[in-house]
Image: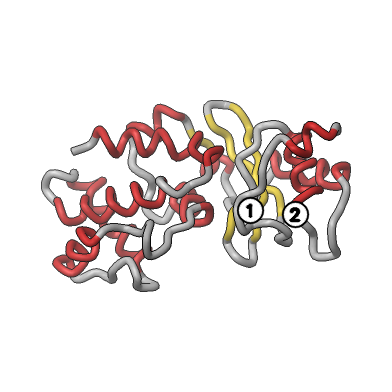
């Protein structure tokens, strides 16, 4: 593993030095890897499609509970991440296609939404708009600042998927507004996964 592999990817801002595992997903038949802090439910690396580069990145920027390790150590964890996951039991749950992301909404409570929450960095300035808060109030749901807001998003998603956005405009406001705000904050490399979802949202009325 050469020096180029170690410097090819920049760490995510504020997410360096985490005790992390390696996870993976498949997009359009290609395996991509990432660091994941299971204790904090945080994605802690770019989305990387080169196993050697993932191992080099982890050696430079991540740790295990007993401290840092060399790329050879991390290469073993990268290989294991292709075979199994600490986040999902079924490999189908971490398998995506660009066309599917463009044409289908995320499954309520599913792995895609979980990853979006784990990688995004919403705050008071970048968070969902006032329209979402107003829609939540009309629906009787928790607002964006409430700990139960994720449940509100799941419920609204379920309604929109079942009945369509035209018949439930407030639910659609919550779903589209949250997803658009969250996707707008994802690091560039993660746009490979979430960019097609944003494109699909923009085309849905």
- Residue at 47 percent across and 50 percent down: it is 116
Is 153 positioned to the left or the right of 193 in the image? left
Q: Residues within 10 Å of mark 2 (few under 14, many from 20)?
A: many
Q: Position of residue 197 (x, y in %)?
A: 38, 38
Viewer-proximal residue among 132 and 204: 132
Viewer-proximal residue among 39 and 133: 133
Instruction: Name the residue beneath numbered marker 2.
Output: 62
Instruction: Name the residue beneath numbered marker 1.
Output: 44
Is 105 positioned to the left or the right of 134 in the image? right
Describe the colour scheme in one phrase: secondary structure
- Residue at 69 percent across and 39 percent down: it is 82
Examine the rendered structure and indicate whether residue 130 appears above or below residue 147: above
- Residue at 65 percent across and 59 percent down: it is 37
Examine the rendered structure and indicate whether residue 94 appears above or below residue 199: below
State if disc 2 and disc 1 touch (CB < 8 Å): yes
Report how far apart the C-alphas of labels 1 and 2 lie in the structure. Answer: 8 Å
């Amino acid at each position: 593993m050469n020096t180029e592999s170690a410097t090819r990817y920049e760490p995510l801002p504020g997410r360096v030095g985490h005790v992390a595992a390696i996870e993976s997903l498949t997009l359009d038949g290609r395996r991509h890897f990432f660091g994941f802090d299971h204790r904090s439910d945080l994605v802690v690396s770019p989305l990387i499609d080169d196993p050697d580069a993932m191992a080099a990145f982890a050696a430079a920027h991540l740790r295990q509970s007993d401290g840092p390790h060399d790329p050879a150590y991390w290469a073993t964890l990268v290989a294991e991440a292709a075979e199994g996951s600490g986040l999902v039991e079924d490999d189908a749950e971490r398998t995506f296609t660009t066309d599917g992301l463009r044409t289908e909404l995320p499954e309520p409570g599913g792995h895609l939404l979980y990853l979006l929450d784990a990688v995004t960095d919403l705050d008071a300035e970048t968070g969902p708009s006032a329209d979402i808060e107003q829609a939540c109030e009309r629906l009787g749901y928790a607002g964006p600042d409430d700990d139960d807001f994720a449940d509100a998003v799941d419920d609204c998603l379920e309604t929109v998927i079942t009945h369509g956005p035209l018949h439930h405009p407030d639910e659609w406001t919550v779903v589209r507004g949250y997803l658009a705000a969250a996707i707008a904050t994802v690091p560039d490399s993660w746009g490979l996964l979430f960019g097609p979802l944003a494109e699909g949202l923009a085309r849905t009325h």
